[in-house]
Amino acid sequence: MMQMIVNKETSEYQLQLRLRKTQSDLAVMGIGVIAFGVWSVIKSVLYVALNTESALASLEGNKYLILAFWLILGAALAIDLAFRLYVGRSAIAEGKGRKKKNGYILLALLMSVLSFAALAAGLLSQGSSTDTDSVGATLLVELTSDVLLLGVVVSAIRVKRLSRKLTGTES
C-alpha cells in the first residue's frame, strides 16, 4: 500500500516537473516568435527598399502607384507582425500558467505551413542563384522561424495534455 502511494506521488511530481519545463519552453518560443516577427518586418522592408529601385523607376511619374505599393506592403507586414505578436504573447501567457484558447495554436500551425510553402516556392523560383550566401542565410532564418512556430504548436499541446493529466480530467 505504501509503495503505491509513493509511486503515485512520484508520478505526479514528475508530471509537474515536465509541465513546468514545457511551459518554460513554450514561453521562450513565444519570445522567439515575436523576435522573428520583428526581424521579418525589418528584413522585408530592407529587401524591398534595396531591390525595387529599378522596378519603381518605371513608375517615377506616378507617385500614387508608388504610395499604393508601400501602403499595401506596410499593411501586409503589419498583419504578419500582428499575427506573430498574438501567437507569441499567447504562448508566453500559457507558458506562465494562464489559460489561453486554442486559436493561437491553429494560427501558429497555419502560419508555419504557409511559411514552409512560401519558402519552398521561393527556393524553386530562385533556381541557380549566384548569391548563394544570401539564399543560405535567408533559408536558415526562415527555417528557424518555422521551427519555432511548430515548436509553439507542439509545446502548447503538451502543456494542455499535462495540465489535464494533473487535474485528473484525462486518464
Image (cartoon, rainbow, N blue to C red):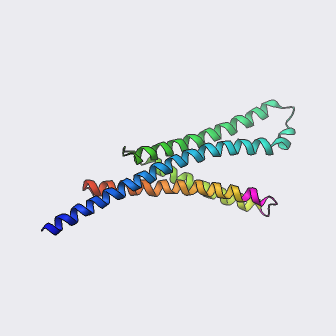
Q: On the image, which quarter does residue 116 sit in?
A: bottom right
Q: Is residue 158 left or right of residue 8?
A: right
Q: Is residue 154 left or right of residue 49?
A: left
What residue is drawn where x is 77% and y is 60%?
132
Counting the numbered discs, the total is 0
What residue is drawn where x is 63% and y is 58%?
117
Quadrant where the N terminus sits is bottom left
Residue lying farthest to the left in this orientation: 1
Identify the magenta region.
Answer: 127-135
Q: On the image, which quarter does residue 121 sit in?
A: bottom right
Q: Is residue 108 left or right of residue 140?
A: left
Confirm whether residue 171 shows in the render: no
- Quick one: 76 or 146, which is closer to the camera? 146
Image coordinates of residue 61 in percent, x first then y, are 87, 31
- Quick one: 4 or 54, which is closer to the camera? 4
- Quick one: 15 or 69, which is closer to the camera? 15
What residue is drawn where x is 41% and y is 55%?
22
Judge whether 140 appears above or below 77 on screen.
Answer: below
> Magenta stretch: residue 129 in it?
yes
Judge whether 52 appears above or below 151 on screen.
Answer: above
Q: Is residue 165 left or right of residue 85?
A: left
Confirm whether residue 79 shows in the render: yes
Judge whether 19 appears above or below 104 on screen.
Answer: below
Image coordinates of residue 171 in percent, x first then y, are 26, 62
> Magenta stretch: residue 106 in it?
no
Judge whether 49 appears above or below 128 on screen.
Answer: above
Image coordinates of residue 154 in percent, x first then y, are 45, 58
Image coordinates of residue 66 in percent, x first then y, are 78, 34
